[in-house]
Amino acid sequence: MHDLHPELTQAMDCMMDKLNEVLQKAEYQGEPIKMYLAGGMAVHYHCGTRYTEDVDASFSHRLLLPYKELVVEYLREDSTRSSIYLDPTYNDTFALLHPDHRESCIAWQDIGNERRKIHLLVFSPLDLAISKIARFSENDQADIIALAQRRYFTTPELQKRAVEALDYYVGDTRWIHLNLRQISEEIELALSA
């Protein structure tokens, strides 16, 4: 983990406290619930290249959450007001994901997992990049390149894992292959610059 945008990391820590309070109020006594973090906040963990407002996550258990109470306000480095919120519309069913992506997640270090009934796990850089190939917005492309520039994976590793993931999807995958080819070329250009 880097030390960029510590205020965003602190906001995430506060959100985890709020989630833990929800579990305490519900008198949850089971094993810690796993929160699998994707999207811009996972990119923040690995790279610190940009801010994000929505927190994209899936969970090991089905949860009924008070989403409006899970908004965390904070000040960015330039003193502008911002906030993060747990995105109630995030759905990992429609993202390109390898079937083993949860097993590859890593614990967010120094976020306080040991003191909570909910543990924050972050998509591995490779699986995070793959999850961004389907939507393929400008932010997604920039995120994939940022992860590749930090040498978290090679282009052949990205291609192999994406093709393995595609074996589990139904539908026309030609456009995914086109996105994969395009981002592979962009990565190679970025790494050779």
Image (spheres, helix red, strand yellow):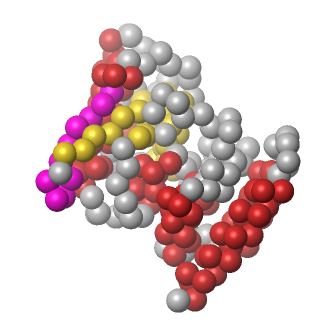
Residue 162's spot in the image, x, y percent? 74, 58
101 is higher (above) or lower (below) than 145: above
Residue appearing at x 38%, y 10% in the figure: 27
| Magenta region | 70-79
Q: Residue at x 42, y 14 (%)?
A: 28
Determine whether, in the image, residue 179 is placed left or right of residue 114: right
In the displayed structure, does residue 102 sit left or right of residue 73?
Answer: right
x and y percent of residue 85 in the render?
Answer: 36, 35
Q: Which of 121 and 179 is in front in this view?
A: 179
Horizontal and vertical percent position of residue 125: 55, 59
Say how many tags the image has.
0
Is 61 magenta? The answer is: no
Q: In which quarter of the image is residue 51?
A: bottom left
Kindly indicate the quadrant of the structure image that contains residue 59: top right
Which residue occupies 18% across, 58% down?
Answer: 77
Q: Where is residue 171 in the image (x, y as percent from the top left)?
A: 85, 43
Relative to 140, does residue 89 appear above or below in the rendering? Answer: above
Near-viewer residue (7 or 90):
90
